[in-house]
Amino acid sequence: MLRSAAPSAGPTGFAARSSRALLSPWFRLGLLVVLLAGAAATVVAVRPERLLADGWPPQLSGGAAVVLFAVAYGLCTAAFVPRPILNIAAGALFGSPFGTAAAVAGTVLGSGLAFGLGRLLGQDALRPLLRGRWLTAADRQLSRHGFRSMLAIRLFPGVPFAAANYCAAVSRMGWAPFLLATGIGSVPNTAAYVIAGSHASTPTSPAFLAAMAFIGVTGLAAVVVAWRKRGRTRA
């Protein structure tokens, strides 16, 4: 009886080792990198910026087109597509009100997708690497003051949007503060780009000039804030 049971120990041990390897933090981090690389390659092949030149397919219109655009926006955001391009496209395709709604919904959707992927596949592997002073301080700020910190990040476009998603995922920030701060903080800058896109054919119109002025002021404010914080960190 003992001899007949012995051969099963080998496959069982191999299966256990394989299971541990597949569930290890570094394997999951590698899977995340592969997924993001595949998404980026798909975006390069599809070239979503063509919407600015070709427009939306004529067979899609109305509310279905807005919803579909929001979903596509979210997927592109998670794949590191620059949001300004998508926001301008939303304004050109749907106008200011519906374009802003679609862009903000897509922003929250894409941020949630990136946050979930980063937390599920990357957090366990990356958290032990947070040893530098700046990284430790950023992690502590996001973990303790998640809503306030993320709201500031979204309001001032100094931090790359996709990078902020994955950095927040590595921290201990909760889902609700992250999504709420993203939804609220993304509205002003998103609306400005959407308005600029919807009035791109009339670049001398007050709406277009006001939108571009807002984008320029917030960008300058982000540079000033980043410069001041860098000086404090060095001190």
Image (tube, rainbow, N blue to C red):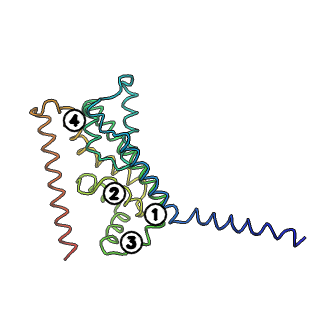
- Which residue is under mark 4? 197
- Which residue is under mark 3? 130
3D distance between C-alphas at marks 2 and 1: 14 Å
Image: 12 above or below 111: below
- Across and down, in percent, residue 94 comes to 29, 29
Image: 121 above or below 74: below
Q: Residue at x 27, y 36 (%)?
A: 89
- Which residue is under mark 2? 163
Closer to the N terminus: mark 2 or mark 1?
1
* Circle 2 Cα neighbour tier, 10 Å, few/some/many (<14 / 14–19 / ≥20): few
- Mark 2–mark 1 contact, CB under 8 Å? no
Closer to the N terminus: mark 4 or mark 2?
2
Q: Which mark is residue 228?
A: none
3D distance between C-alphas at marks 3 and 2: 15 Å
Quick check: 5 left or right of 29?
right
- Which residue is under mark 1? 123
Quick check: 163 left or right of 188?
right
Type of the residue with mark 1: Gln
Type of the residue with mark 4: Gly
3D distance between C-alphas at marks 1 and 3: 11 Å
